[in-house]
């Protein structure tokens, strides 16, 4: 009974993270940092989405990889449903594909590193899976190699992060780099809650 309630809570937490991220991605972060106009490269969704990996890693540590994958599939279903309501079919495809692929990779890497130091499995799996998530999402969502519904603003070539002396790349590359940077920061921060929840396991 406790196990069932815990898994229900995990699925609810995953759904909450996905819904919050899909909602907050509509709101850019305002202000400047190191000369970068943040609302051009970052949304608030970047700060909530990495907690999906925290949920997966906690479930993996306590209940094992099979149940962690079930939670990931539940999150995938929510991700696709919410994305179809809030975004274009292309974004929904990119979001769902990136989410499921990255979550399953996270589970696999975590399992390989399960018996090392407590922080190694969650940090390594999240860093690598987040990189894959970023590449798949931004590649599918905005790459001109996939001609379906091209976002002309996203593929416009500009200096990275809008910095005058930076190399030029499609605008979505700046978005992807900023997004991944935030994922790394949040992943490091999430080690605290992860340790607190899983300390006995």
Image: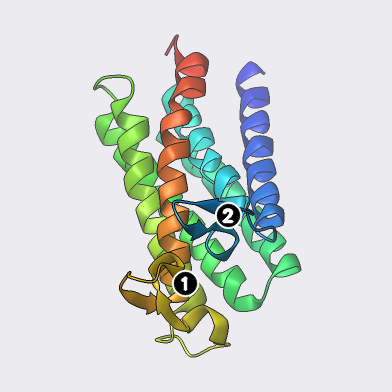
Q: Is residue 132 visible?
A: yes
Front position in the image: 39 or 141: 39
Residue 71 drawn at (x, y percent): 56, 41
Q: Is residue 151 visible?
A: no
Residue 44 drawn at (x, y percent): 63, 50
Q: Which mark is residue 76?
A: 2
Q: Would you say 81 lies left or right of 179 here?
A: right
Residue farthest right in this picture: 85
Q: Which residue is drawn at the image coordinates 39% and 86% (left, top)?
A: 145
Q: Would you say 53 lies left or right of 126 here?
A: right
Front position in the image: 152 or 36: 36
Q: Could you give the CA–CA distance between mark 2 and mark 1, rounded to whole angstroms?
A: 23 Å
Q: Residues within 10 Å of mark 1 (few under 14, many from 20)?
A: many
Total labels: the figure holds 2
Residue depth check, mark 2 versus mark 1: number of the one nearer the observer: 1
Element under label 2?
A: helix
In which quadrant is the N terminus drawn? top right
Whether pointer 2 and pointer 1 mark residues with C-beta atoms closer than 8 Å, the reply is no
Residue 201 drawn at (x, y percent): 42, 13
Front position in the image: 65 or 34: 34
Residue 112 drawn at (x, y percent): 25, 35
Q: Would you say 46 lies left or right of 161 here?
A: right
Q: Which residue is drawn at the image coordinates 34% and 40% (left, top)?
A: 125
* Relative vertical location of residue 14 with respect to residue 137 in this rendering, above or below: above
- Per the image, the residue denoted by label 1 is 172
**Circle nearer the N terminus (2, 1):** 2
Q: Residues within 10 Å of mark 2 (few under 14, many from 20)?
A: many
Residue farthest bottom in this picture: 147
């Amino acid at each position: 009974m406790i196990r069932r309630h815990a898994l229900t809570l995990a699925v609810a937490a995953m759904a909450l993270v996905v819904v919050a991220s899909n909602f907050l991605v509509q709101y850019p972060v305002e202000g400047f940092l190191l000369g970068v106009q943040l609302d051009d490269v970052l949304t608030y969704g970047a700060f909530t989405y990495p907690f999906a990996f925290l949920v997966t890693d906690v479930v993996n540590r306590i209940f094992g990889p099979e149940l962690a994958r079930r939670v990931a599939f539940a999150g995938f279903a929510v991700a696709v449903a919410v994305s179809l309501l809030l975004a274009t079919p292309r974004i929904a495809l990119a979001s769902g594909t990136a989410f499921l692929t990255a979550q399953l990779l996270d589970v696999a890497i975590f399992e390989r590193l399960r018996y090392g130091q407590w922080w190694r499995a969650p940090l390594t799996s999240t860093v690598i899976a987040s990189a894959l998530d970023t590449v798949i999402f931004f590649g599918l969502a905005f790459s001109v190699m996939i001609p379906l519904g091209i976002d002309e603003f996203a593929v416009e070539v500009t200096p990275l992060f809008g910095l005058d002396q930076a190399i030029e790349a499609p605008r979505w590359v700046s978005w992807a780099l900023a997004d991944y940077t935030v994922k790394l920061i949040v992943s490091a921060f999430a080690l605290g809650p992860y340790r607190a929840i899983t300390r006995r396991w």
